[in-house]
Image: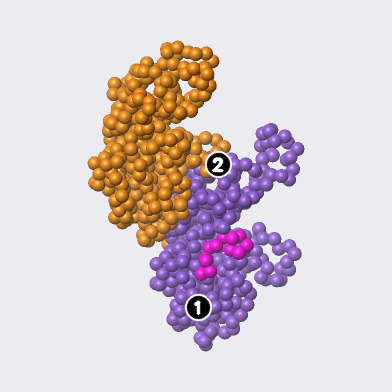
Chain colours: A orange, B purple
Amino acid sequence: MKLATIGVGNAGSKIIDRMLEFEDKTGRSLCRHVLVINSARTDLAKPDYVPEDRRILIGDTHKKAKGHGVGGDVEVGAEVAKHDIDEIRRAFDDVEIHEVDAIIVAAGLGGGTGSGAGPVVIEELQKMYDEPVYGLGILPGEYEGGRPALNAARSLQSFVQKVDNFIAFDNDAWRSRGQTIEEGYEQMNRELAVRIVTLLAAGEIDETDVAENAMDSSDIMRTLDTDGVSSIGYASTTISNDADDGLLNRFREDEKPVGDATDAAKIKGLVRRAVNSRLTIPCEVTSADRALIILSGPSELISRKGIESARQWLENEADTVDILAGDDPRPNASELSAVVLLSNVTETPRVDEIQSQAVDAQDKIAELEAAREEEINELITDEDDELDPVV
Amino acid sequence: MKLALIGVGHAGSRIVDRALERELETGRDLCNGNVLVFDTAADAFDDITHVPSDCQVRFGDIHPDVDADGVGGDPDLGVTVAREDVQELRRAFDAVDFNDVDGLLLVAGLGGGTGGGAGAVLLEELQAICDKPIYALGVLPEADEPDRCALTASRALQSFVEIADNVICFDNDAWRSTVSYTDTAESEADRPYDELDRTVVSHVLTAFGASESAAMTTAAENRIDASDITRTLETGGVSSIGRATLELDRSDDGRSWLPSWLPLPSWLEGDAVDGPADAAEVKRLVRRAIDSQLTLPCAVDSTYRVLVVLSGPPTAVSRKGFESARYWLEQETGTVEVLAGDEPRPDASTLTATVLLSTVTDVPRIDALQERGRTAAEAADESESGDAEFVW
């Protein structure tokens, strides 16, 4: 698939940057056009792989932003994007849209810029183009608190309504001990980038090695065409490059040449591991509407039988017959990986949690706001209000 | 966030001067040279060393009631002379480039006649000419200062809160006990102030100057930007800043007899760590910042919005620690509006947590101040009705 990729806000921009990095390292060519949009000037300087002229600062004339971000306020985020919509639109002028199959908009939903400006950008893209627009949204973790949960719960509604599919990523599912903040987010962004790129780049570079079950863009787009929320599972295994041992022996854990049956079992095992591993958003697999399996790696390692048995396994597991499975031959890959897209999953406990945290936060905010003026006034005046202000 | 610093009265001017000194010491540029000090007394700027002399403005000195000591602690006289000299004050603002800063901070002792009285007038003027947020830093009078200072402060606080976008308060009394008087003659009145001024200045600089440090050579994950600070403070009222520091050097803490692979028994866990400070350590640091080291002691759960900045080497802040500190603050303060940021200073040997509690509404110290103020007001009324003029 050929993509136009847009990162909105700090988290969204970082994801796009990591996607470009992963593409670069694995010789893929997915993102044909790239753009990052942010309301904070300093954050726009961060990406390593996004060209300088593909970075847009919005809200630099807005009273509450002025190039310094929107202070985590989703309303201000939406406002500045609406205000600067012409500038955003102009940035698409040089995008040859016939060269791309779809547009992806990545954003963090807990902050202000991604959550607020993201849906505004998407709305504009939907007006401008017929190509599908996918959202890639990072949901805040529980410990990020009530305000991010509220931003996310509200933004999620706008995103899902406006996109053709929303691929969700749950921060909480990816926390681990002992990481510094830098490492923590960096690792998450890389994990997400690997999944997205492996999924969407399937069937892109392949002149030499024609696959039997090659996946192409239309299959992926068909699976994504559900208007819902999706989750991605992923697993990979390193291939030992001991060429003398023959092709079938290139799984690292193998010691003897193995037969076709064992190979098929491995493929199935890998797919199973992908679904049972950390999904980008934990969900009830049976609630998926459609699914897609892609095996990516040297084609000699991917047997048709393996793919078929993996597909059957997932059909059972997800309780849907709408499952596509195929391979993405990568002759020089050092890993064999399986990526599974679960499209339109409707049972995602994390989304429910965020919504309930958001409701509590909204109540709390309203309650405090109602009392604020009076409490300030009570504080600054004495008990019987006898003392006068100096001016 | 870049803030122009405006000092009013003796205490305000002194603190602004200290702030400039501290900017130089720490490489944290808050005001970009946008600074002004105002006073009414003749010798007002004698001990000012860092504010350039063309940024020192004396006013009101032609008023008959103003003598060499200025307005003599009378806030109403402070207001009167500031209004009379308003053209001159406005002209003085030309020295400040409002486009060069994200906001202004007016610093004043609330118990003084110039700080509390003229300070309020200056706030009005600033609000009229500048569309950036105008904050105030108000120093509350101490318990051993006369009750009339408490009266002035109570009245000035009302005006400051009314006019400024937010008023950060500093309570000298709360900090007295932490300042060491050793080696300094107690008669030398200015010495303890020096320490107190440094305290308030370092709190203000790390809170407002987050992300303005020259030592911040790598990009922050969650950078505290001007909009974050502005949003936190936009609820107005009175605010307090807490700050605590954790030494990261573990070399000579007396625990080196333990093999490094051995987990530390809990009774040996001090506040000194190397490697990423874990969740419990970061939380403890943040707790320390708001438990005992607030510029204005207050009921933490009366806060409306919170901003927390963790500043130190990026390797020292664990993601879990960062998140749990933020979450803990949300629980503790009872507000969901908690913004958190990091300030990576790769070469730093300390981890500092700075917490801005915006719009605190339960402040016993202010209630006590008003009580003293009322006593003073009643005394003044009595002496007036007794035909004697109230002497400031």
Disc 2 is placed on an element classified as loop
- Residue drawn 59% across the image and 50% down it: B346
A60 left or right, relative to A255: left
Relative height, residue B87 to residue B309 (above, below): below
Query: In what quadrant of the picture does the C terminus of chain B appear?
Result: bottom right
Give percent across and percent down for residue B49: 62, 73
Relative height, residue B367 to residue A203 (above, below): below
Residue marked by disc 2: A180
Residue marked by disc 1: B78
Query: Which is more foreground, mark 1 or mark 2?
Result: 2
Relative height, residue B91 to residue B216 (above, below): below
* The one of A389 and A63 positioned closer to us in this rendering: A63
Q: Is residue B385 visible?
A: no
Give percent across and percent down for residue A255: 54, 15
Would you identify the image quadrant in which residue B132 lies?
bottom left
Which residue range is magenta in the image? B23-34
**Within 10 angstroms of label 2, few (less than 14), some, or many (20 or more) residues?**
many
- Residue drawn 53% across the image and 69% down it: B33
